[in-house]
Amino acid sequence: MALYCVIMARNKHYEKIMPNKLIKKDSLIDKLTVTLLIYPHVLATGVTLPVEMLLAGEAFARRYDKSVLKLTTQFLSESADSIKSRAGITMMADITLEAVASSMSPDIIIVPSLWRNPRPVLKSHQKLISWLQNCWQQGSTLIGVGTGVCFLAESGLLDNHSATTHWHYVDQFKRDYPKVDLKPDFFITQSERIYCAASLNALADIIVHLIAQHYGKAAAQNVERNFSHEIRKPYEEQRYLEGSGDRHADELIAEIQFWLRTHLNTELTLTDIAKLFGMSQRSFTRRFKAATGTRATQYWQQLRIETAKELLSSSNLTIQEIADQVGYQDQGHLTRLFKQNLNLTPKAYRAMVRKKLFS
């Protein structure tokens, strides 16, 4: 089964001043540099897909703001000018490791996956592994998927940190890298500036997340609609974030979260729910934000929107019936939230996603 690579970026040179509008924080830094590694038996899809999606995001954002980050990409190999991929596609390197060793490290380094056993390639690319370690120390973001994660593990950067890989290679990975905290049940992990993903779907999800960070929410939604119409969970709901509050220790807040997920159509307010669990509104608000990293109102609204999206794609309920099920008696309220979050009405969203659903 094919294994793929995903990427994330480190520089945050822009800040929002209005919806989907970005301004530069440092006019001297206006580029986003992405280096994609190529080596024998590399899977070409893991190299081409992220570039095509990022270019689409940059192009969309540039239509409305000429000052957005300029995307610069390059293919890098350890020594050869050309590399033959697993599919027999010849890929030309823009630069070799010797030529880039003394230059500034890239913002992002994509570590694509290999077909089947990665160990022979790892053994013959020790200089590349050392270069990855050096780039991380200089501030680069490293992201790999599937067996590409082995390059990061070989460098020692993943020791005592979380990671994931393709399900087919889990047992061997555990034997080869016992110091890595492998999370095989997660498709995406994040540990400081190292990101790992296990599948092509995870690749697409993280790229959309990346585009939202660097080119704005509207650009990310445009790319998602063009590259991946099907219903998917957002990046934040899939990844294991090392040290985050996602899997927090506040048992009472976790109990309230479960209650919210199973009572979306309740008429109770959050103040009522806080009292139901023996808490004051102030204490509830503070503890919920501390445990989850988000406000309770945002969390509950997102739960309702995601449930509505699932019902629109998988049921024949009317939009009013769906609004009732997720706690909005007014269909217009649900429509306004969809437009605000997705730039689509519920009706348009249903039509879009059902084009890819089989009867």
Image (tube, helix red, strand yellow):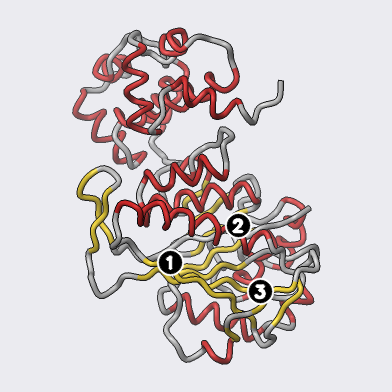
Instruction: Return the residue found at the far front.
Output: 63
Task: Read off the residue under disc 3.
Answer: 38
Task: Read off the residue under disc 1.
Answer: 71
Q: Is residue 271 above or below residue 287?
A: above
Q: Is residue 234 above or below residue 260?
A: below
**Could you tell whether 252 is left or right of 22 in the image?**
right
Image quadrant of residue 331? top left
Q: Is the C terminus in the top left, top right, bottom left or bottom right quadrant?
A: top right
Circle on res. 115: none
Residue for point 29% across, 73% down: 29
Task: Read off the residue under disc 2.
Answer: 49
Q: Is residue 106 above or below residue 342?
A: below
Q: Secondary structure at mark 1?
A: strand
Q: Which x, y percent locates residue 288?
A: 31, 34
Q: Secondary structure at mark 3?
A: loop
Which mark sits nearer the N-terminus, 2 or 1? 2
Amino acid at circle 2: Leu
Residue for point 23% across, 69% down: 26
Q: Are marks 2 and 3 in contact (CB under 8 Å)?
A: no
Foreground residue among 152 and 199? 199
Q: Is residue 70 above or below residue 93?
A: above
Q: CA distance from mark 2 to mark 1?
A: 15 Å
**Could you tell whether 27 is left or right of 330 in the image?**
left
